[in-house]
Image (cartoon, rainbow, N blue to C red):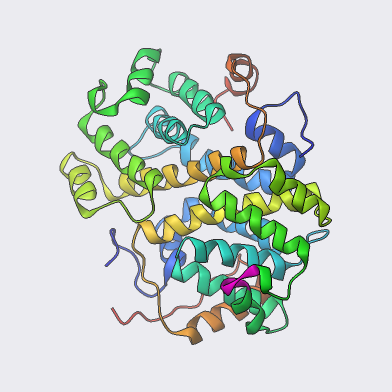
Amino acid sequence: MPHINLPTEFPGIRSLFMYRPETAAPLNALVQAMLHNPHPTLSAGERELIATYVSRLNTCKYCCNIHGAIAQHQLGNNAEIVQQVLADPETAPISSKLKALLKIATKVQSGGKNVLPDDIELARSEGATDLEIHDAVLIAAAFCMYNRYVDGLATWQPDDAAIYDKMGEQRAREGYLTPPYKVVSSQ
Amino acid sequence: MNLPNEIPGIRSLFMCRPETAAQLDTLVQTLLHNPHPMLNCGERELIAAYVSRLNTCKYCCNIHGSLVDENQLGDNSEMIIQVLTDPETAPISNKMKALLNIADKVHTSRKKVTADDIALAIKEGATDMEIYDTRFIADAFCMYNCYVAGLAAYQPDDVEQFIDEEYSTASF
């Protein structure tokens, strides 16, 4: 049961966006800029994997499932790679650079001050640019915010994987600025 | 990272990534500066400064603490220090204390804002929107604090000059 009265036909963060459109606009624009807009070196799929992994660390079911689904569709409908990253980035079939960026994101999730020069050096030695390091930190910090926002107000978070797949396919294709699907709540 | 060394805190990060700076600026403008039906700018800046203090983010705490002064709470530096030290004994309304208690819970750990915390705020006269925005400000400032700390942006001890130069027009 959400802590405040929210529209029941939209799950997760979308119900909060409907409740407070003034803040929804910059939040949507931020996630669009971080994850969807063209990036000189990191693919949308790689950036979605960082968002998905941080959401898993924060045990935010909605964000982890939806961004996992978006990552899957951004990566050529590859669900396996998403599950492997969530299980253990070190053994997942991703670049050493992305592994190092996920390590930085993990440190950010535990507290910004936990990011140490060695973490940055490791990422640089694997070829990460300043922009990539910046974006890994910002995506991780921002997803701690989105995750808390969704969980903190106890929004409705569906269990049905098909719902996330449908929403994920839409977001991978359209980005974050188009209207959401209505999903009828069973509550 | 190589950051412009003449600019402190989050502003140096904004300069190296304008694509995301615009969104982060718009968000803080919406949360803290734009008109709000119930919480004035000073009250919202106080929540931001308090959360930044809890997160030990010197730059954000100092900047937003100073902006409390700039925005509608008058010259109240003593009150701000009292709030940053212990909101319970500070000369602020019970509603504000209940909202800062919620902000504290948001900072401490996820999912720890209890029904009792919400009930207390409602009992002290807080509306759904005030509770919602308090949580959101606290949540967003955990992000801003983490962003500044995670990239080890320069945080000067003396922020007054930057406030005078950059923020006294009271707009983000």
Task: Give coordinates of residue B168: x percent, y percent.
Answer: 57, 19
Quadrant where the image shows the N terminus of chain A:
bottom left
Image coordinates for residue A89, horizontal then vertical, percent: 64, 68
Extreme residue in the bottom direction:
A162
Foreground pick, B31 / A140: A140
The one of B142 and A120 positioned closer to us in this rendering: A120
Q: Quadrant of residue A8?
A: bottom left
Please determine whether, in this image, residue A179 is positioned above or below residue B113. Answer: below
The image shows residue B140 at horizontal and vertical percentages of 49, 45
Q: Using the rendered image of the protein, determine whether residue A69 is visible from the camera's viewpoint.
A: yes
The residue sitting at the left extreme is B123
Q: Is residue B113 left or right of residue B149?
A: left
The image shows residue B130, relative to residue B82, as above or below, that is below
Residue A49, position as x, y percentages in the image: 64, 68
Residue A102 painted magenta: no
Q: Quadrant of the C terminus of chain A?
A: bottom left
Residue A23 lies, with reference to residue A96, above or below; the image says: above
Characterize the magenta stretch by its predominant secondary structure.
helix
Q: Residue at left 54%, top 39%? A: B145
Magenta-drawn segment: A85-89
Horizontal side of B44 relative to B127 (left or right) equals right
